[in-house]
Image (spheres, grey):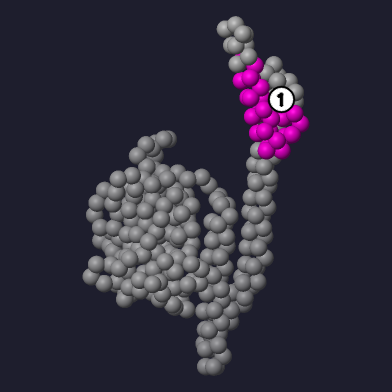
Amino acid sequence: MSSADRRAALVAAGCGLVATLLATAAALLGELWAGLAVAAAGGGGLAAGLWLILRRWTRRHQAALASLRRRSDREDRLIGDLGHELRTPVTTLSTSVQVLSNHEAEIPDRPRRALRLARAEIDHLRRLLDDLLTLARAEAGVHQIEARPVALRDLITGLLTARQLPPRLLAPGPDVTVAARPAELERVLTNLLDNAERHGGGLAGIGLARDGSEAVLTVDDDGPGVPAADRQRIFERFVTGRRSRRGTGIGLALVAETITAHGGQVDCDARPGGGARFTVRLPAVTDLTPPGIVT
């Protein structure tokens, strides 16, 4: 066999091998007819067979993405409908209790105590419902707006002012910017502050720093701390190492879910000197495009 004949034989064998591999891949993708077409065509039909496989594969994945979008839309509508249907009776009960509360001085002592209990329970139910719906949206990935640059120091300062807490609770230092959905991040901070006030003996301080590519936010409280065995469990629903009827049992679970959805993590440790320390880590932003900070 001449050198030219050997080269021709090698080329033919190579084309046949490639065609066979494409046919096998196409069969694994469920496109058997395309694989057979490629195998039958041999080397001459290689490009056409490959184009057929890629076209069918693209269409299949486009259909899968469209199905995911429809599922997300259905979940969004379901959460909205549930929120409306559940809030309506709670609102009615709350309004009725408020009407009775306007005449509380005219009510005898025992019914008055019952009214106060009902008012407290309805308020607890309302907060629990809000937290559950917010957690459901977070778990389903249902977001009203896209993430944008958020200046953490400005956000924390505004929250302290709104709660009439002294600005000195935020330790001095540089600002750090993260990419986040502002309302969700504010809810995280609110839940951490609520947790410190309800279960931790009050807020002891807030720290803000940058560690490499991460923004690090710490929230300290003056309470007894969280036992080491409970420091992971408290981020689960309805589980807390410092149980109190004042909370809903959802707040820290919502914190963990929201921070995870933003590409970060949250941990609980012992605070130096006593109490608990909650540490939130989020990816920091250095290139602000477009310019401007949303707080």
The residue that mark 1 highlights is 38
Residue 6, quarter of the rendered image: top right
The kind of secondary structure element at disc 1 is helix
Of the pair 117 and 30, the residue shown nearer to us = 30
- What residue lies at 67% left-to-right and 58% top-to-bottom? 78
The image shows residue 42, relative to residue 210, as above or below, that is above
The image shows residue 13, relative to residue 228, as above or below, that is above
Of the pair 260 and 135, the residue shown nearer to us = 260
Magenta-colored segment: predominant secondary structure: helix
Decide if residue 186 is on the left or right side of residue 28.
left
Is 205 covered by the magenta stretch? no
Amino acid type, residue under disc 1 in the picture: Val
Decide if residue 36 is on the left or right side of residue 291.
right
Can residue 294 be seen from the camera position used here? no
- What residue lies at 43% left-to-right and 69% top-to-bottom? 234
Quadrant occupied by the N terminus: top right
Residue 113 locus on image (x, y percent): 52, 89
Residue 74 locus on image (x, y percent): 68, 52
Residue 16 locus on image (x, y percent): 66, 22
Image mark count: 1
Decide if residue 34 is on the left or right side of residue 75.
right
Q: Which residues are magenta?
A: 11-36
- What residue lies at 60% left-to-right and 16% top-to-bottom? 10
Residue 253 locus on image (x, y percent): 48, 64
Q: Residues within 10 Å of mark 1 (few under 14, many from 20)?
A: many
- What residue lies at 71% left-to-right and 25% top-to-bottom? 38
Of the pair 283 and 198, the residue shown nearer to us = 283
Can residue 10 be seen from the camera position used here? yes
